[in-house]
Image: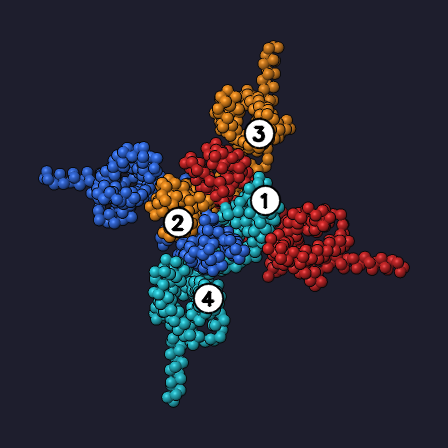
Chain colours: A cyan, B blue, C orange, D red
Amino acid sequence: MAAKNGASDAHRSRDRLGDIIFGTETPAGKTFDLILIIAILVSVAVVMLESTEYFRTNYGPLLTGLEWGFTILFTVEYLMRLYTAARPWRYARSFFGIVDLLSIIPTYISYFFPGTQVLVAIRTLRILRVFRVLKLVKFVREAGVLGRAIVASRHKIIVFLYTVLVLAVIVGSLMYLIEGEEHGFTSIPRSIYWAIVTVTTVGYGDITPQTVAGQTLSAFLMIMGYAIIAVPTGIVTTELAREEMRSTARLMCRSCNTEGHDPDAAYCKFCGEALINHLNAQRE
Amino acid sequence: MAAKNGASDAHRSRDRLGDIIFGTETPAGKTFDLILIIAILVSVAVVMLESTEYFRTNYGPLLTGLEWGFTILFTVEYLMRLYTAARPWRYARSFFGIVDLLSIIPTYISYFFPGTQVLVAIRTLRILRVFRVLKLVKFVREAGVLGRAIVASRHKIIVFLYTVLVLAVIVGSLMYLIEGEEHGFTSIPRSIYWAIVTVTTVGYGDITPQTVAGQTLSAFLMIMGYAIIAVPTGIVTTELAREEMRSTARLMCRSCNTEGHDPDAAYCKFCGEALINHLNAQRE
Amino acid sequence: MAAKNGASDAHRSRDRLGDIIFGTETPAGKTFDLILIIAILVSVAVVMLESTEYFRTNYGPLLTGLEWGFTILFTVEYLMRLYTAARPWRYARSFFGIVDLLSIIPTYISYFFPGTQVLVAIRTLRILRVFRVLKLVKFVREAGVLGRAIVASRHKIIVFLYTVLVLAVIVGSLMYLIEGEEHGFTSIPRSIYWAIVTVTTVGYGDITPQTVAGQTLSAFLMIMGYAIIAVPTGIVTTELAREEMRSTARLMCRSCNTEGHDPDAAYCKFCGEALINHLNAQRE
Amino acid sequence: MAAKNGASDAHRSRDRLGDIIFGTETPAGKTFDLILIIAILVSVAVVMLESTEYFRTNYGPLLTGLEWGFTILFTVEYLMRLYTAARPWRYARSFFGIVDLLSIIPTYISYFFPGTQVLVAIRTLRILRVFRVLKLVKFVREAGVLGRAIVASRHKIIVFLYTVLVLAVIVGSLMYLIEGEEHGFTSIPRSIYWAIVTVTTVGYGDITPQTVAGQTLSAFLMIMGYAIIAVPTGIVTTELAREEMRSTARLMCRSCNTEGHDPDAAYCKFCGEALINHLNAQRE
């Protein structure tokens, strides 16, 4: 009886811990998430400062100490997540499970293998962890609308990006022929890199055409890049407008059979009958 | 009696002065605003010329004289605003109250503390004062539509900007690993600066990738930046279209006093009463 | 009688000449316009080649000869336009009248005043003359839709551009404080030039921030510039959609009083009655 | 009889071969297309590596061998296409027929004329062949929507591009006057190249204005370029929204066989007959 109670208590306390760690509803869960966000952001700042020569030279020991503190904190958190997760193995293989692991491993590796100092930059992946905690805030619906609009237009965006890449390959190859190695276009891949820099209107200027033919071709490429940026914009705008419409206006009037009512409407704007949102129940 | 009249007169003349300074309706108020706009623009031009070596050397005394003239003019104006404001302290702490103060203080400080010459650049903040005076012109409705559209889409824009920043942090850290300090990526913050320069398609070219891996990753980042510019554009366009629709066809229900009805609505969507478009007559 | 006939004949032949020169309907008018377009484009090409050192050295006399040929041709054309225009003085002061004059004057000036060689670049203004002749082609309706959309959104675009300029002035002044003259920010106007280069995402890289504070501020400016490009796009898109709607769908069904029919519709899509385009007559 | 059967057999086997090579429906046709895509992509990669000095030096013979293998493979494929095509001559003159030929010829030419090594870059045109094979995948409908939207807005885009080019010619000529040859603006064509680099917001920084007047004019050009990018975006977005609407709700009138009716239409707008949405059932 006592053993069963003990097991049940342990079970219950694990559940409660899980609510705090994974949940975002309870006050304790919110406090946990807030502390975690601050810890993540400060630890990313520490990683950045450590990579700067000035801070590495002057505050090296302090930054190393902080880094170890955060690593131990995140390790404890990771183990607790494994312990409280309903399916630990599934959590470990999930996107955030891998990010959580990658956030702590480099510090341990650099301790045992001194030459792997450079791997520590991987720790900035910690910034991705903030996305999980963002469940806290109200931005989720907005992110959802954006996400669905991008997913819905993914085919068109792939067609577009493929066209841009083919354009970059062809113009890059032509520029390799026209300008040649003496003007910085030393190979086709490098010329394609130049073409991407140009068509996306980034324009570093590390490689630039020197001949009249090359400048004419690149002027053509620039104008192409300048005009076709309109295409993804049009795609996303159209999809976003439709997604907005879908997620906000799904009311139908049963008396006159019209649609297109606002999400806050209680009466039909065409015939004045009361509206019933018959899709609300369906949507999750 | 005379004292009372005197006080009342003083009160009345203060009100009249306030109408001229803060108001934009009366002819005197309009003239005052026009003179103020010219004074602001000329004084900003003087600050700019003063920062240019050629003008500082050749016209130094003239510019200093003009600057003192404008400072005294704006000081008098500031004191009059304080005097005529209904709640002086509230004005002093308001956005424009602080801008007004920052517009005049640097000149006095540079007089008493000769080494603070450099602070004078703060005086270009005066340009912000023009916004207040813009109440004059008809652009306010347009600015209102734009402003409301941006406010309505602020959540989506924050989600978007956060995603761009996280992308810049991650790609920046990877480039620090790939390119290393010998190619100009001397620290993670500097690499993130490079990533922002690249993803926004600015592309200074002060730091550029030299290795094949780095150029491949940055080509990916450029194409991302080129494609995802579509997202804020889609957001603002969708919101602007909706805001336009709302602000051009503003129907009001006389029975429940609600607004926001569609331009083709015949019945109030909140209470079911018939709508009368009482604004159609007013609008030209 | 003969004199009257003679005057009438001269009058009639002037009218016929005017039809050829200004008109675009008759076969003779179309041929004239086609020859003129070719002459304009070739003469602009000659101006460009003349500015190139290689061609100036090797083909100088040929290019000068061609230039004089075109100048005389355009002078004859200009005089004929003056002669055949209904109101010569009004034509001379019109936009295209001034462009026509500016296209021929520099050559004469450079003949009489040898030092004014450099003015010849003004002759590229000839390219503007092609716009007049474009009446030929069908692009006019499209240009009209674009033009009206831009005119309709001009207030919003001015508000937008003013905001961008104020942002550039403020960030430029701050960068002058932060970076100082030793990093290329030698004056406030030059810093504002840098800010405009950055906020428009052009990014020459001739002036770049060197300090951490300057790079942080410019990263902020880039992200602003990257995000706010969405605003004019949204404005023009919304206006263009509305303009399209206006210019294409102005049919109203007289039997069921509905609008929104396509411009090619002959029957009402809601009730099946025949449609009468009662606005066609009104529109020019 | 036997001869006739033999001829019929040969005919039938040619048809079957044609189905495999040109078709995309049968399993054999799909397998053929998949192998072809892989061969194309690998051969393009080989061309790119061959242009890189490191790979040319270390793996020259291997790459040459692979190149000859692919050339022979594509030659066999080209001959088979000629053999199985219903109209061989029409295929040979078609866009893809020419691309197929250009993909194999440079290798043979470089064998017979050793100095034409450089022509091999033309072989990257092979990447265009992937477009034909893309019939395989589902992206065709999406590409069709994009393509029709761009075709429908081609007049407006041409007007826009012409305006941008005229702006570049005029500002380029002015900059040649203002900056002169000593600041890199050595000729009008080169100044126009600079203007295009600037107005498209590419901004290499290989030519930059040095004078105050030049910087002011280029700041104006940048802001123009930054604002007018909104125009093609608006055009494509509007057209895409309309195209989407058309292609998703395609009603056909059974009495007059016309398409292009709005999704909410109940009667044919051309003949007034009742419409039945016979595609709703077909669509998933």
Distance from disc 1 to disc 2, alpha carbons, whole Å, reads 33 Å
| Kind of residue at badge 3 | Thr
Mark 4 — on which chain does it sit? A
In front: label 1 or label 4: 4
Q: Is residue C231 above or below residue C76?
A: below
In the displayed structure, does residue B36 sit left or right of residue C153? left
| Kind of residue at badge 1 | Glu
For mark 1, give the secondary structure. helix
Q: Which of C260 and B161 is in front in this view?
A: B161
Position in image of residue A82 (x %, y %): 44, 75
Mark 1 — on which chain does it sit? A
Instruction: Say whether residue C56 is visible.
Output: yes
Q: Tell me the residue that label 1 is attached to.
A: A179
User: Sequence-wise, which precedes: disc 1 or disc 4?
Assistant: 4
Query: In the image, which disc is placed on residue C57?
Result: 3
Q: Tell me the residue that label 2 is attached to.
A: C210
Q: Which of D271 and A123 is in front in this view?
A: A123
Distance from disc 3 to disc 4, alpha carbons, whole Å, reads 63 Å
For mark 3, give the secondary structure. helix
In the displayed structure, does residue B107 sit left or right of residue C127? left
Query: In the image, which disc is placed on residue D91?
Result: none
